[in-house]
Image (tube, grey):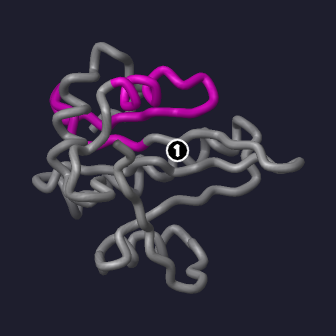
Amino acid sequence: MEIRKATLDDFVELYKLGSSVPELKVTDEEFMSEADFKWHIKNPKGAFLLAEDNKKIVGFACMSLRERNEDTYACLVYLAVSPDYRRSHIASELYSKIEQKAKEMGAEYIYGRMDANSEPIQKFMKRQDYRFGQACIWVDKKLR
């Protein structure tokens, strides 16, 4: 297993994986636009790492920095692992590397969004020492 920085050359395989992981979809709509996904790969104020097994992309993690007042926050935008490779510690390794990158880039906090109905995701985030506040619901609407 190798973890490395993603490039635009990896886009097709990464986007296919991201589109196929239902936990990454906020609504029943399409995963996200190709342009937005490419922007995250190129974002100079973030990190986009992937995990490969024998040259096959099996997972990825993406983080983007945001500044608020005098603090720098890292937003965990994505953490995805192919269903065929789950329970093999790939998510933990990707998460660890993303957190390390966030610290190197000056982040003081890291936050993210997760599926409130997914017990496995909640267990994973608790193992990463995330605090859980009051429940919230993510709402969205497509603007026409």
Horizontally, residue 107 falls left or right of residue 117, namely right
- The image shows residue 126, relative to residue 59, as above or below, that is below
Depth check: 114 or 87 in front? 114
Name the residue rendered at 19%, 42% in the picture.
Answer: 19
Q: Quadrant of residue 17?
A: top left
The quarter of the picture where the N terminus appears is top left
On screen, residue 128 above or below 141: below
Viewer-nearest residue: 47 or 100:
47
Coordinates of residue 89 in the picture (x, y in percent): 31, 58
Residue 41 falls within the magenta-colored stretch: yes
Q: Secondary structure at mark 1?
A: helix
Measured as percent of width and height from the top left, residue 125 is found at 46, 70
122 part of magenta stretch: no
Instruction: Name the residue carrying label 1.
Output: 98
Toward which corner of the image does residue 49 lie, by quadrant? top left
Q: Amino acid at mark 1?
A: Ile
Q: Which residues are magenta?
A: 35-61
Spot occupied by residue 3 in the image (x, y as percentages of width and height): 37, 34
When the figure is inspected, residue 18 is found, relative to residue 57, above or below; the finding is below
Other residues around mark 1 within 10 Å, as few (<14) / some (14–19) / many (≥20):
many
